[in-house]
Each structure stands twice: as structure tokens, then as C-alpha cells.
Image (cartoon, grey):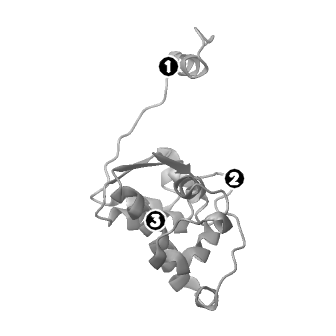
Amino acid sequence: VLQGGGDGGNRATPYLAWRRVFATLLSVTRADEVTTIRTDLARFAPLLNAVLPSAVDEPPLIREMQGDVRSANTRRLLASLLEDAAADGPLLLTLDNVHWLDSSSLRLLSDLLDLEVPIALVLTARTDERHLNADLERLMADARVRTLQVGAFSTREVSAFVSAALGLGEVPA
């Protein structure tokens, strides 16, 4: 299981929602710590700077990539890393607060729908904020996406949830 998610206080940082996913997947916290990557992808590894904090030196090939070309190659690298992980067995990827995702993160999600590997995506979004993001609306309208609307918790349900999460007998309502 890989987990990530949007951050309402930082919607402008590309791929921020994926930072935890790829840090876990690659067992690193910074891009310059990556040592295990498929040989044919290694020359694109500096593109991980967009996802993981670091300043990996970029060779001329990477430095010359700009705009859409750089974005497409970054997404291709990230999708390939997830494909490799899924080749070892089914992969569950959860992203919370997708209503706060930046456009690069949403494009990567769309790209993942096209992969023919066993990756299950579980996404959470607030329905009252979903309409604010046209890219998310397009993603949710995709025929391959199934939605499940969950209503708000009652006071009693919130109390039971908090009690269970904290391991307490009972939390006052």
C-alpha cells in the first residue's frame, strides 16, 4: 500500500501529493538518495527532483527539457516506477484530498488509468470542493472511475471513530 495526498495549504507545488508515495516506493526521502532504479530509467532519474526534495545535478539532456516535454517525461518516469512495483504483485495506491491536487498530479493520475498493470487507486475528495478543479472533474467523469459517496458522520459515529482510533473506551460526544 502506497499513500499520498493533497495539501490544502500548498496547491501550487507540482507532484506534492506524490512525495510520500515515491519516497516510500524508493525507500528514500530525497531524490539524490535514489540508488535502485531500472537501468533504462536511470538517465531520467534527475526528473525526480520534481517530486522529492533535492538538487540532483541535471545532465544536459534533462536541463534542455522544458514545459510539456519535461512534464511528459516526468510523468512517464513516475508511471514506469509504479508499473515496476506493480509487476511484483498488485499495488494499492491511496491518495487523500484529491480536490487539492495540482494539475501535474492529476495528469499523472489520468496516466495511471491507462496502465495495464494491477494498480488499484483509492481516492478521497470532498464533493463540495470537487467542482473547483476542472482537471479533477474530467478525471472523475472517466468511465473507468467508480465513485462512492459517503455521507457525513453523525456525532455518535465521530465519537465511536475517535474512540477506536485512540484506543479509548468512550469519548464524550
Q: Which tag, 2 or 1, sits closer to the chain's start?
A: 2
Closer to the eye: label 3 or 1? 3
**Quick check: 131 above or below 36?**
above
Residue at far right of view: 55
Res 34 → quadrant: bottom right
Q: Quadrant of the N terminus?
A: top left
Q: Position of residue 131 (x, y in %)?
A: 48, 55
Q: Residue at x 47, y 45 (%)?
A: 124
Residue at far top of view: 169
SS state under label 2? loop
**115 with respect to 101 (left or right):** left
Q: Nearer the viewer, residue 25 or 152?
A: 25
Q: Which residue is mark 1?
A: 157
Q: Which mark is residue 81?
A: 3
**168 with respect to 85 (left or right):** right
Q: Which mark is residue 9?
A: 2
SS state under label 1? helix
Q: Position of residue 35 (x, y in %)?
A: 58, 66
Q: Nearer the viewer, residue 110 or 42?
A: 42
Q: Label 2 to label 1, Cα distance in Å?
A: 28 Å
